[in-house]
Image (cartoon, grey):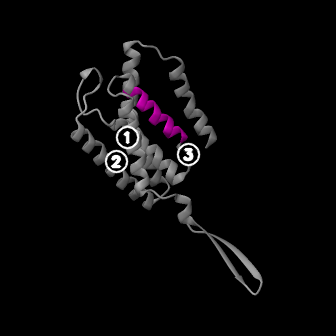
Amino acid sequence: MYLVTKRFLIPFIFLFLFYSNSYSQNKSFETAGDIFLFAVPAATFGTTLLLKDKQGSWQFTKSLLTNTAVTYGLKIALNKPRPNNNGDNAFPSGHTSTTFHGASFIHRRYGFKYSIPVYLAAGFTAFSRIDAQRHDGWDILAGAAVGIGSTYLFTTPYQQEHMELTMSSGNGEYLLGFVYKL
């Protein structure tokens, strides 16, 4: 998994090192952020399917629906204008809440080391929204909080459901047991 993470980091480092303020490059950042909006949840849900993690699939679905409802509920209720008045409903960032939801789900369900590439994609998406002047820092921060928060409502760690540690004692004897369930 470390090699996958390392290979995933290289494109992001390249993008950040060669970033300039030209319009075409800004447009490509925005487009990449739009792609991650769909790629991150699809890859996250696909992971649950590949692992045959039915409970994880259900937890992902519940938390994604909650994330979407809270995000769009706040957008409609607050109707905050976007930077440079290029639209409304800026708060919170939907792109950011969706991608951070996916990253947080992988983190919470399968562990931090597996979520690093997804957090990088989520961070890049947040950056692309600011760079495209669709959101400001508060919109991004709120989007990340909603995405991560919705995950913590429903997601349990995968490993704990499959591992059990037991201990038994009697007559001065102690027995420690470990059970792994598929």
Q: In the picture, residue 127 is in which quadrant?
A: top left
| Callout 3 crowding tier (Cα within 10 Å): few <14, some 14–19, many ≥20 | some
Q: In this figure, which residue is indicated by the disc labeled 1?
A: 97
- Number of the front mark, 3 or 1: 1
Q: Earlier along the polypeptide chain: callout 1 or callout 2?
A: 2
- Most frequent secondary structure within the magenta stretch: helix
| Count of labels in the image | 3
Screen quadrant of the N terminus: top right
Q: In the picture, residue 43 is in which quadrant?
A: top left
Give the residues drawn in magenta, as a range: 116-129
Question: Which kind of residue does numbered mark 1 sit on?
Answer: Ser
Q: Residue at x 52, y 58 (%)?
A: 158
CA gap, disc 3 and disc 1: 19 Å
Q: Which residue is drawn at 37% across and 40% down?
A: 97
- Considering the numbered disc 2 on the image, is that residue within a helix, a strand or a loop? helix
> Percent from the top left, x then y, of residue 117?
53, 38
Q: Which of 11 and 178 is in front in this view?
A: 178
Q: Residue at x 54, y 22 (%)?
A: 14
Q: Earlier along the polypeptide chain: callout 2 or callout 3?
A: 2
173 lies above or below 97: below
Q: In this figure, which residue is indicated by the disc labeled 3?
A: 114
